[in-house]
Image (cartoon, grey):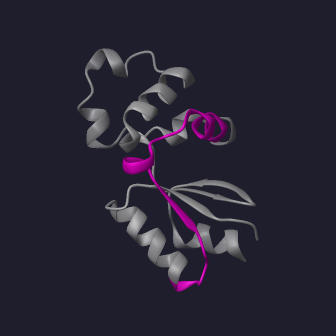
């Protein structure tokens, strides 16, 4: 398998679970920290094309809930990408990029199927 990359925020509980799972399976990966490295338009555009912006935009988190109502209205892909670039905490976590594609979120069953 080629390079495995995980994108997220290190203090996120779901990220911690996913990282622990990868380590337990002895899977090498590179971690991209949105807080330090930001969210890049190119990879957000690619992920939206593969998974849909609705899948990537986390509307359940406090960052989304704290947005002014006018920013939450009329969201389309361009606006979602802009919001995620400005507020990387709004990107659903983790995003795992492997040779098999892009996976959003974590569950041991999904990760196991990816690496079998």
Residue at position x 56%, y 65% in the image: 30
Badge count: 0
Q: Is residue 43 magenta?
A: yes
**Residue drawn 45% across the image and 77% down it:** 20
What is the quadrant of the C terminus in the image? bottom right
Point out residue 39 in the picture as x, y percentages from the top left corner. 48, 40
Residue drawn at the location 36% of the way across and 44% of the way down: 89
Point out the residue furthest to the front here: 36
Relative to 114, does residue 76 appear above or below in the rendering?
above
Residue 106 location, x and y as percent? 50, 63
Residue 93 on image: x %, y %: 45, 53
Residues rendered magenta in the picture: 24-48
State whether residue 67 is above or below residue 94.
above
Quarter of the figure with residue 15? bottom left
The N terminus, quarter of image:
bottom right
Give residue 29's quadrant in the image. Answer: bottom right
Residue 29, compared with residue 32, is above or below; it is below
Residue at 25 percent across and 21 percent down: it is 68
Quarter-of-image position of residue 83: top left
Horizontal and vertical percent for residue 23?
A: 51, 80
Query: Is residue 35 rendered magenta in the image?
Result: yes
In this rendering, position of residue 12 left or right of residue 7: left
């Amino acid at each position: 398998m080629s390079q495995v990359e995980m994108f997220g925020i290190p203090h996120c509980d779901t990220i911690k679970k996913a990282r622990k799972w990868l380590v337990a399976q002895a899977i090498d990966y590179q971690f991209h920290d949105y807080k330090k490295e930001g969210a890049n338009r190119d990879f957000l555009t690619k992920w939206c094309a593969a998974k849909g912006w609705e899948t990537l935009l986390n509307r359940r988190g406090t960052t989304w809930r704290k947005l002014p109502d006018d920013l939450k209205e009329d969201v389309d892909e361009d606006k979602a990408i802009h919001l995620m670039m400005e507020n990387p905490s709004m990107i659903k976590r983790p995003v795992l990029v492997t040779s098999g594609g892009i996976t959003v979120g974590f569950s041991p069953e999904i990760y196991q199927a990816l690496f079998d």
